[in-house]
Image (spheres, grey):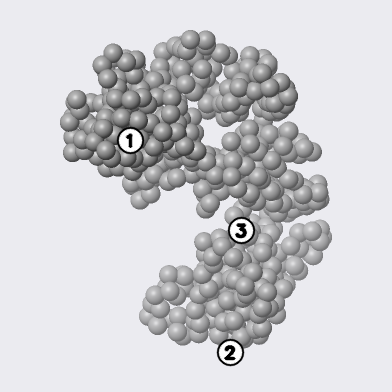
């Protein structure tokens, strides 16, 4: 019998209903349990609820195969570590267990058996399941997955094999997991990874520690990751181009997507794209099922867990706009022109570090060297993470504008605007100065922090009006800027 603050209750009857179970106990009480436990619960089993109705410790009567089972929600799963007996294990957090264990320890053998189909009664090869050689590329793997899934869906007698084939593809399509799987096939002592980093509900067979702070699992009976289906748009310029895949990471939305040539038809990329990709403006539309994962990031000397979402390769649909070839040509052209006039570009950048330079002056310098009309003044100081929308909306309403360090200064009818066209930055507005040259000279000696804090009353002297902080809605930002500038804002833009 297990001790603890919450008593074990013996089951008198288990009633199956849609999606869940109703357990009636010998003491006359009832409780609901997850439907996944249907084939594991029987009369006289003892249940201990560790928090919510999903966190359950199951004690079987003596003589049964599974002495103790744990069904719980797991959080982040760490990297493998060697145990005292030499076998690797991983540690998973149990965030919803208010009573009982706070951590779940999964043996390397349990991971090999469940996630990689090794060490089981009938070990299976992922490559054989997909019918591809060990040297298959990512696009070949996707093609094989599509063919095999269609075959299994048509043949109802083999439809039960579809989850195994999908798991094979999702492991082999992930570079780190594929390396892990190949190592496990060659060496049974290799350390296995928990795919995609945890977060989900799990049912395991094992035993509770004597102090009840941990549960040690010898076998995984079922696992369902936390998943979300959603449609997102991704900027190509924020992707990283590898030889066999394109990796898109969005730190703001905490998203990660891996793409191959089968879902990006017509994009014959290579590693050189990473040098000029920041000039791309194309957005691709992705419909995917995302599994929740965790990543530790170092902030101010402290490691903090951040929750991410990774797209399952098997459940991915991508729409690529038809204007991609033109966008690629434009980006390559700008990159080439900046290289052709590298000395002049560097000279302008050096000047912009000291004082604001009007765009017309930059255009005159370009004309002196017969630069192509495709080369624009803003290209000189443009940075990879800059968003064209913010720049263009302010530029087209300007009487004139200046380049200054990592900012652009726009002169409007009623205000002068200082803008870093990047998500996460604010737009600074000043009253139109009586003497523009004097304003620019004084502004060049300040920082944005000086202005925010009104250090030595300098912000007031410059006529600082205020900041417009950007949110998720770009048109709402524009409406707020127009309002502060005394310009007319379109009603649709304000509430889009």
Q: Which mark is residue 380?
A: none
Identified at 52% across, 10% down, the residue is 122
Judge from the rendering whether residue 153 lies leftward or rightward of residue 312; answer left or right.
right
Q: Mark 2 packing: few (<14 Cα in 10 Å), some, or many (20+)?
A: few
Considering only vertical position in the picture, is 1 above or below 389? above
Among the two numbered marks 2 and 1 on one chain, the one whose residue lies closer to the N terminus: 1
Q: CA distance from mark 1 to mark 3?
A: 61 Å
Q: Which sits in the foreground, 38 or 247?
A: 38
Considering only vertical position in the picture, is 494 above or below 320? below
Give the residue number, with chain letter if any, for mark 3: 386
Q: CA distance from mark 2 to mark 3?
A: 31 Å
Q: Mark 1 packing: few (<14 Cα in 10 Å), some, or many (20+)?
A: some
- Quadrant in which residue 457 is drawn: bottom left
Give the mark toward the camera: 2 or 1: 1
- Position of the N terminus, as image quadrant, is top left
Identified at 41% across, 41% down, the residue is 296
Q: Which sits in the foreground, 144 or 364?
A: 144
- Position of the C terminus, as image quadrant, is bottom right
Residue 169 locus on image (x, y percent): 61, 26
- Disc 1 vs disc 3: Cβ atoms closer than 8 Å? no
Q: Secondary structure at mark 1?
A: strand
Among the two numbered marks 2 and 3 on one chain, the one whose residue lies closer to the N terminus: 3
Q: Secondary structure at mark 2?
A: loop
Q: Which sits in the foreground, 16 or 88?
A: 16
Give the residue number, with chain letter if any, for mark 1: 24
Q: Which mark is residue 434?
A: 2
Give the mark toward the camera: 1 or 3: 1
State the count of labels.
3
Among the two numbered marks 1 and 3 on one chain, the one whose residue lies closer to the N terminus: 1
Note whether residue 330 is visible: yes
Identified at 30% across, 26% down, the residue is 45
């Amino acid at each position: 019998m297990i001790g603890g603050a919450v008593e074990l209750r013996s089951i008198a009857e288990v009633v199956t209903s849609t999606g869940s179970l109703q357990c009636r106990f010998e003491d006359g009480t009832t409780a609901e349990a997850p439907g996944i436990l249907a084939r594991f619960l029987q009369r006289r089993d003892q249940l201990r609820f560790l928090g919510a109705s999903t966190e359950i410790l199951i004690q079987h009567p003596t003589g049964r195969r599974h002495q103790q089972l744990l069904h719980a929600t797991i959080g982040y799963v760490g990297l493998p570590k060697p145990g005292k007996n030499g076998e690797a294990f991983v540690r998973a957090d149990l965030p919803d267990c208010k009573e009982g264990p706070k951590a779940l320890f999964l043996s390397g053998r349990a991971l090999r058996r469940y996630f990689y189909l090794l060490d089981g009664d009938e070990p299976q090869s992922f490559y054989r399941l997909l019918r591809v050689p060990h040297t298959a590329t990512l696009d070949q793997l996707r093609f094989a997955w599509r063919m095999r899934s269609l075959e299994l869906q048509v043949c109802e007698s083999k439809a039960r094999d579809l989850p195994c084939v999908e798991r094979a593809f999702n492991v082999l399509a992930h570079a780190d997991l594929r390396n892990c799987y190949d190592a496990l096939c060659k060496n049974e002592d290799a350390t296995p990874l928990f795919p995609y980093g945890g977060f989900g509900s799990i049912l395991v067979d094992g035993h509770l520690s004597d102090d009840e702070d941990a549960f040690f699992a010898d076998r995984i009976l079922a696992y369902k990751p936390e998943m979300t289906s959603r449609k997102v748009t991704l900027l190509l310029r924020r992707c990283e181009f590898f030889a066999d895949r394109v990796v898109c990471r969005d730190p703001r939305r905490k998203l990660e997507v891996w793409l191959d040539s089968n879902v990006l038809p017509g994009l014959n990329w290579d590693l050189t794209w990473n040098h000029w990709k920041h000039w791309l403006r194309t957005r691709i539309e992705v419909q995917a099922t995302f599994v929740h994962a965790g990543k530790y990031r170092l902030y101010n000397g402290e490691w903090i867990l951040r929750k991410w979402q990774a797209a399952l390769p098997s459940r991915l649909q991508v729409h690529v706009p038809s204007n991609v070839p033109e966008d690629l040509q434009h980006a390559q052209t700008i990159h080439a022109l900046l290289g052709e006039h590298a000395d002049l570009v560097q000279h302008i950048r050096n000047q912009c570090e000291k004082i604001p330079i009007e765009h017309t002056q930059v255009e005159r310098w370009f004309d002196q060297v017969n630069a192509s009309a495709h080369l624009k003044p803003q290209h000189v100081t443009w940075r990879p993470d800059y968003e064209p929308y913010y720049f263009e909306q302010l530029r087209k309403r300007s009487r004139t504008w200046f380049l200054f360090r990592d900012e652009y200064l726009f002169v409007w009818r009623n205000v002068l605007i200082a803008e870093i066209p990047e998500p996460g930055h604010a737009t600074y507005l000043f009253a139109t100065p009586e003497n523009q040259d004097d304003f620019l000279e004084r502004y060049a000696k300040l920082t944005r922090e000086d202005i925010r804090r009104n250090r030595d009353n300098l912000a007031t002297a410059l006529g600082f009006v205020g900041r417009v902080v950007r949110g998720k809605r770009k048109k709402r930002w524009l409406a707020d800027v127009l309002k502060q500038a005394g310009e007319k804002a379109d009603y649709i833009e304000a509430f889009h």
